[in-house]
Image (cartoon, rainbow, N blue to C red):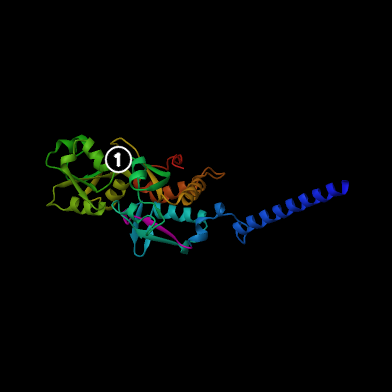
Amino acid sequence: MKATAVVVVAAVLAGAGWFAWAQRDDTTEAAGSDGRGAAETRFVDDHPVLRVGVKEDQPGLSVKSGDEYVGFEPDLAREIARELGYSPDQVVFSPVTSGNRSDRLGSRVDLVLASYSISEEREKTEQVRFAGPYFEALPGLLVRKNRKYEDLGDFQDDRTATVCTARNSVYVPWLKEQGLGDRMDLRGGYDDCVTELLDPESDVYGVATDDVIVAGLADKYSAKTKALKGLGGLESYGAATADEEPGLHREVCAALAEVMAKSADGKSRWGELYARHLEPLMREPAPDEPDLSSC
């Protein structure tokens, strides 16, 4: 009887040992030859190049100079890419506009940093995920220098004035709220709006966009334009990824946290980028790094 019991116990233990070994073997095979599970795979492992969409007509934020993109957003994208494991030559920039940036996500670019304001409606209708904010802007108005506009009220009172903004931008509903809905000229991008503003034959006397964009344009066209600021409201810029790439969204959030983290001397890489590209235009020192509320 005792001998039979010993045989049964031995058989059970042997079976359990085989099961554990088989499970371990299956787990190792599923994890891959490097022993890393699928959940730990980084975006760079399957995407040797990071494709980034930026604008090419916003001084300070992002402009194309020759074959290179320069400004706060391209440099921030390079810092994010470094945190994601990419070298500088693995980052490829492509131009986007306010009208096509969501359509290009996933198909032509992996990441968009293009003064893209965060909103729940956009995340639903445009099927994007926002990481950020990485910058917070206020509404601004670029106007002709020869017009006696000192604030938004002066512009509203001039019934001959048309205001231009980018199609699909957040300023379309904003202008309607300001009573300017019947005096809008909608264009594909702000460069088209500025062309109209500078044309003396045009009735476009203002361009509505974020104050940081207005500051850059007013500096570039200082002989003919000026900036109206302090119009109220807040626009938070987010780094956009395609909705079907939640892993990339998490990695970008982690990267932004590193770029915005202050070192022992109280400075951050984000602050250095602001000082280099935006402080000369905004004429203000770097504000505090935004809270990453969309991460």
Q: Is residue 43 above or below residue 160?
A: below
Magenta segment's dominant SS is: strand
Where does residue 263 sit, x and y in percent of width and height? 55, 45
* Percent x, y of residue 78: 45, 56
The residue sitting at 15% across, 35% down in the picture is 157
Query: Few, some or many C-alpha atoms within 10 Å of disc 1 (few <14, some 14-19, many ≥20)?
Result: many
Q: Is residue 144 visible?
A: no
Q: Secondary structure at mark 1?
A: strand
- Is 129 placed above or below 96 here? above
Q: Amino acid at mark 1?
A: Pro
- In the picture, measured across the screen, residue 152 lies left or right of residue 280, that is left
Q: In the displayed image of the protein, which residue is found farthest to the front? A: 1
Residue 32 in the image: above or below residue 212: below
In the foreground, 265 or 60? 60
Asked whether residue 274 is in view, the answer is: yes
The foreground one among 22 and 84 is 22
The span shown in magenta is 48-58
Residue on which disc 1 sits: 139
Q: Is residue 78 left or right of residue 140?
A: right
* Residue sticking out furthest to the right: 2
**Does the magenta-highlighted stretch encompass residue 88?**
no
Q: Quadrant of residue 183?
A: top left
Mark count: 1
Residue 215, percent across and down? 31, 46
Where's residue 131, x and y in %?
A: 43, 46
The reply to whether the magenta stretch includes residue 54 is: yes
